[in-house]
């Protein structure tokens, strides 16, 4: 099992996000993950990877050893995968 967590704000998430991701804003992440088993694989994403890198460090310090920040974040994902079929976009 794994989770793909987008740590951006709800407004940014509503604008566009990866298919299958859930929105848990950075400031709420530690509260939210408190009920997760520590062995679950967690992928984290933010706009440019900076905030998801910080989130991964924080979670690893709390015992979540299976945390990975997607390098370069959503910006890099869009640059690398020009086909935006894996993005959901909205006008919220």
Image (tube, helix red, strand yellow):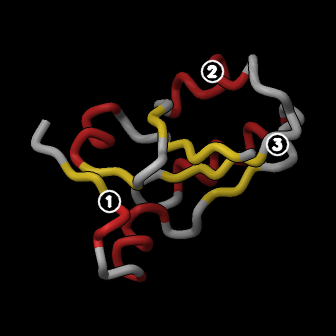
Q: Between residues 23 and 53, which one lies in front from this camera angle?
A: 23
Left or right, residue 89 beside residue 1: left
Q: Between residues 42 and 51, which one lies in front from this camera angle?
A: 42
Q: Between residues 40 and 54, which one lies in front from this camera angle?
A: 40
- SS class of the residue under badge 2? helix
Left or right, residue 20 beside residue 34: left
- SS class of the residue under badge 3? helix
- SS class of the residue under badge 1? strand
Mark nearer the N terminus (2 vs 3)? 2
* Location of mark 3 (residue): 60
The image quadrant where one finds the N terminus is top right
Looking at the rendered structure, the number of numbered marks drawn on it comes to 3
Mark nearer the N terminus (3 vs 1)? 3
The image quadrant where one finds the C terminus is top left
Q: Label 3 vs label 1: CA separation?
A: 28 Å
Q: Residue at x 74, y 19 (%)?
A: 34
Res 32 label = 2
Q: Nearer the viewer, mark 3 or mark 1?
A: 1
Left or right, residue 92 beside residue 36: left
Dot 1 crowding, Cα within 10 Å, few <14, some 14–19, many 20+: some
Q: Residue at x 87, y 46 (%)?
A: 65
Dot 3 crowding, Cα within 10 Å, few <14, some 14–19, many 20+: some
Q: Label 2 vs label 3: CA separation?
A: 15 Å
Q: Label 1 vs label 2: CA separation?
A: 24 Å
Q: Nearer the viewer, mark 1 or mark 2?
A: 1
Q: Residue at x 75, y 49 (%)?
A: 67
44 up-or-down from 77: above or below? above
* Location of mark 1 (residue): 87
36 up-or-down from 56: above or below? above
Q: Nearer the viewer, mark 2 or mark 3?
A: 2
Mark nearer the N terminus (1 vs 2)? 2
Left or right, residue 53 beside residue 62: left
């Amino acid at each position: 099992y794994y989770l793909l967590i987008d740590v951006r704000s709800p407004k940014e998430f509503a604008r566009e996000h990866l298919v299958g991701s859930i929105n848990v804003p950075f400031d709420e992440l530690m509260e939210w993950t408190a009920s997760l088993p520590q062995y679950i694989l967690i992928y984290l994403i933010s706009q440019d990877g900076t905030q998801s890198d910080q989130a991964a460090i924080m979670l690893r310090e709390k015992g979540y050893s299976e945390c990975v920040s997607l390098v370069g974040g959503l910006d890099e994902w869009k640059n690398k995968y020009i086909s935006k079929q894996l993005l959901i976009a909205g006008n919220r």
